[in-house]
Image (cartoon, grey):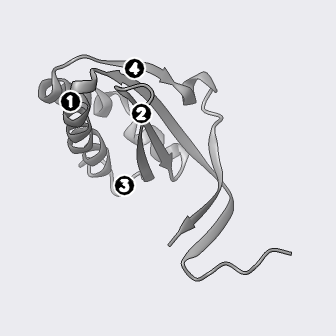
Amino acid sequence: MFPELPGTYRYTCDERLPVEILVFDVDPGDVEEYLRVDHEVWTLGEAFHPELDHIPFLSKEVWLNDHRPGEVTLIFVFESMQAWEQVGAGHIQAQLQAEFDRRFGKRQTLVRAVHEEEHFGIHRWSRFDRT
């Protein structure tokens, strides 16, 4: 029914991987610095935290909205709820938040935590991507 996928694409389904979606509002002039510090503190801090034996998430994407300058959407796909809960431990999050606040130190407002609004029910079911 469908053509065979070329060797550079794959389709994966029935994954049921938990997804965290955070939407922040940042001063448009500070977005570039925010993204740099976010990557250095949050992405790398959660990926390589000394209390974790491996990276708990499969991917992190950053989306910017040209129609809403300063809107930053962060999307994590975790390997499991257990992995998310480990990196989400209060002391780890507090440590990383303190470091982020120290290094960025400018206004940033969490507008939405979509995964919380949906009671952690959002999950990735499938993907079609280039390998």
Residue 43 position by quadrant: top left
Depth check: 131 or 68 in front?
Answer: 68
Separation of marks 3 and 4 at Cα, in angstroms:
24 Å
The extreme left residue here reads 103
The label number, if any, that marks residue 55 in the structure image = 3
Horizontal and vertical percent for residue 76? 46, 44
Disc 2 or 1, which lies upstream in sequence?
2
Closer to the chain start, of discs 2 and 3, is 3
Q: Position of residue 56 (x, y in %)?
A: 41, 51
Nearer to us: label 3 or label 4: 4
Say which amino acid is labelled 4: Leu
Closest to the camera, between mark 4 and mark 1, is: 4
Q: Residue 118: name its quadrant.
A: top right
Mark 4 / mark 1, whichever is N-terminal: 1
**Mark seen at residue 100:** 1
User: Secondary structure under badge 2?
Assistant: loop
Q: Position of residue 41 (x, y in %)?
A: 22, 39
Instruction: Tell me the CA gap for discs 4 and 2.
Output: 18 Å
Report, in whole angstroms, how far the alpha carbon at label 2 lies from the one at label 3. 31 Å
Q: Which residue is mark 2?
A: 66
Q: Earlier in the sequence, mark 1 or mark 3?
A: 3
